[in-house]
């Protein structure tokens, strides 16, 4: 990956197949070589930190996650959220290879903006994956249905010359010999995946395993512009891919580093 980022670039952590950078993703993405990344997975801020409450482990807790999950004020949120999404998606398009693809996770709070931003920035949506959680937190207000799903949009460049990679046969094999559908069911992240530390929106490894195996080949470069606690990187390394992770929070990068080092130990055993 030496030619993807500048030789002068400083890394929070690096190994033969990993580059972790502590930086604002909007400052780092322009420094990545154009058309050098095979796949992007992004779990961007949902902007849910509005001083409300939710249920976690049977206890009532604040929904606030940190300043990174806040934007503007109530009068301008919609405009600023969409501007934010278009900006980072546009930069991801620049670094994505012609035959690469992008996956973006979200909830009703941001996924409609994400879908529109993808089309506005020249992407074609391939699939709309519904992740159905088997153990979602209960709805405290009792005034609507329990929120038990998230959406993951899979897209490629809207160019007739672009042909995304899809490991159809492997997905069919993993699904008992039948075509895999766009509804994936499973639990929230297990405690065993949080031994290095906790992140409020950490995705379970089985989700990233399916995504990475479905849309990349060994040796591919996977980018996560909001890498959080590093699930994307852990799975990428596990299956012989290269990983570039960007985050502005040092505590989360420390969790990512520790998880990657634990994964490397497992790989060597």
Image: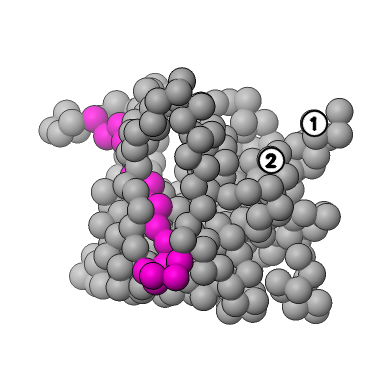
- Is residue 48 among the parts visible in the rendering? no
Furthest-right residue in view? 269
* Horizontal relation, residue 154 to residue 128: left or right: right
Mark on residue 266?
1
Residue 17 sits above or below residue 119 on the image: above
Q: Residues within 10 Å of mark 2 (few under 14, many from 20)?
A: some
Task: Locate the C terminus by quadrant.
Answer: top right
Mark on residue 20?
none
| Residue 2, horizontal then vertical, whole percent | 79, 69
Secondary structure of residue under mark 2: loop
Depth check, front residue: 225 or 38: 38
Label 2 – label 1 distance at C-alpha? 12 Å
Depth check, front residue: 157 or 222: 157
Who's the residue at 51% across and 69% down the image? 98
Q: Residues within 10 Å of mark 1 (few under 14, many from 20)?
A: few
Describe the colour scheme in one phrase: one colour
Residue on which the image places disc 2: 239
Image quadrant assignment for residue 141: top left
Q: Is residue 153 magenta?
A: yes
| Residue 232, horizontal then vertical, whole percent | 59, 47
Q: Which residues are magenta?
A: 146-162
């Amino acid at each position: 990956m030496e030619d993807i980022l500048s030789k002068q670039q400083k890394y929070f952590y690096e190994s033969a197949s990993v580059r972790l950078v502590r930086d604002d993703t909007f400052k780092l993405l322009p420094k990545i070589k154009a058309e050098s990344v095979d796949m992007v997975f992004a779990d961007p801020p949902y902007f849910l930190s509005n001083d409300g409450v939710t249920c976690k482990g049977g206890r009532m807790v604040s929904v606030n996650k940190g300043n990174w999950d806040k934007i503007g004020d109530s009068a301008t949120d919609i405009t600023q959220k969409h501007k934010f999404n278009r900006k980072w998606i546009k930069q991801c398009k620049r670094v994505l290879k012609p035959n690469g693809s992008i996956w973006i996770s979200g909830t009703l709070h941001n996924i409609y903006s994400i879908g529109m931003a993808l089309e506005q920035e020249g992407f074609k949506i391939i699939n709309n994956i519904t992740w159905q959680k088997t153990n979602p937190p209960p709805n405290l207000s009792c005034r609507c249905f329990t929120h038990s799903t998230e959406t993951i949009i899979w897209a490629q460049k809207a160019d007739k010359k672009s042909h995304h990679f899809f490991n159809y046969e492997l997905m069919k094999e993993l699904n008992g010999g039948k075509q895999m559908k766009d509804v994936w069911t499973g639990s929230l992240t297990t405690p065993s995946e949080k031994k290095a530390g906790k992140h409020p929106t950490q995705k379970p490894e089985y989700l990233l395993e399916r995504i990475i195996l479905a849309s990349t080949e060994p040796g591919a470069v996977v980018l996560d512009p909001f890498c959080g606690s590093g699930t994307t990187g852990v799975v990428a390394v596990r299956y012989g891919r290269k990983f570039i992770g960007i985050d502005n929070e040092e505590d989360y990068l420390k969790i990512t580093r520790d998880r990657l080092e634990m994964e490397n130990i497992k790989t060597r055993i």
